[in-house]
Image (cartoon, rainbow, N blue to C red):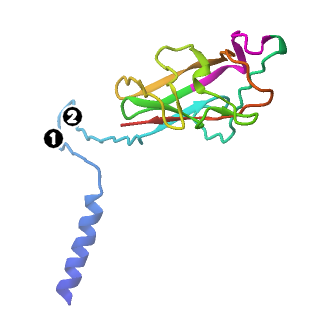
Amino acid sequence: MKFAKQIIALAVVGAAFSAQAESNINSVNAVGQSTSARLNFSIVVPRVIFLSVGTGTNFAVNGAIDTNTFTVTAANVGSGSAVAGSLGAVGVQVLGNGGAVSLTANGTAGGLTGAGLQSIPWSQFALTQSNASLPNPAIGNGVAGAISTLAATNNVVNQSGTWTFNYSNGSVMGAGTYTGQVSYTAALP
């Protein structure tokens, strides 16, 4: 029993000393005497991906979904004159720290639907972008469209810019409101 207590006491003392940082002592009695000790540092950075399309706060969750409304005037119905969206330039931001980011766009199947059985296909929208390194991916019809790959520098993608959408207005459509939604997805490899 006495032997077990001694082992436990040694283990406790050993554990106390094993948690100590590096230390040195210089006991030489001389001018310019010195000693040193080292400390290691470690930083753990989590793998993250962030995507924002529309209004919102950078690097924060925002559940609001913006609506970009295209209002065709009576004089221009089906004229082929492009119609700008109500949001103008839509803010876009992508941040990822795990390599190149794949960006896709999945539009509501059938395009924008409205009056009766009519629909407006996603192909009727043109886009201009303010940052060539942040291209808008092709909008798929019920499935993800073609992938836009955002190149990484030192394993990081940090791109922001604006996308401006225009409705081509090339066909006479029945009166009414046509609605649809595009879901953008950013993915790391």
On the picture, is 7 further left or further right than 157? left
Locate residue 118: give its quadrant: top right
Callout 2 touching callout 1 (CB < 8 Å): yes
The residue at the point 20 percent across, 31 percent down is 31
The percent position of residue 92, horizontal first and vertical second, equals: 58, 25
Q: 20 or 136, which lies in front?
A: 136
In the image, residue 86 above or below residue 39: above
Q: Dot 1: what SS? A: loop
Q: Dot 2: what SS? A: loop
Crowd rating for badge 2 (residues with CA inside 10 Å; few <14, some 14–19, many 20+): few
Crowd rating for badge 1 (residues with CA inside 10 Å; few <14, some 14–19, many 20+): few
Which is nearer the N-term, disc 2 or disc 1? 1
Q: Which mark is residue 33?
A: 2
In the image, residue 185 above or below residue 76: below
The residue at the point 64 percent across, 35 percent down is 181
Q: Which mark is residue 28?
A: 1
Part of the protein shown in magenta? 76-92
Q: Amino acid type of disc 1?
A: Val
The percent position of residue 65, horizontal first and vertical second, equals: 68, 36
The residue at the point 25 percent across, 47 percent down is 23
Q: Amino acid type of disc 2?
A: Gln
On the picture, is 25 further left or further right than 57? left
In the image, residue 189 above or below residue 25: above
The residue at the point 50 percent across, 37 percent down is 143
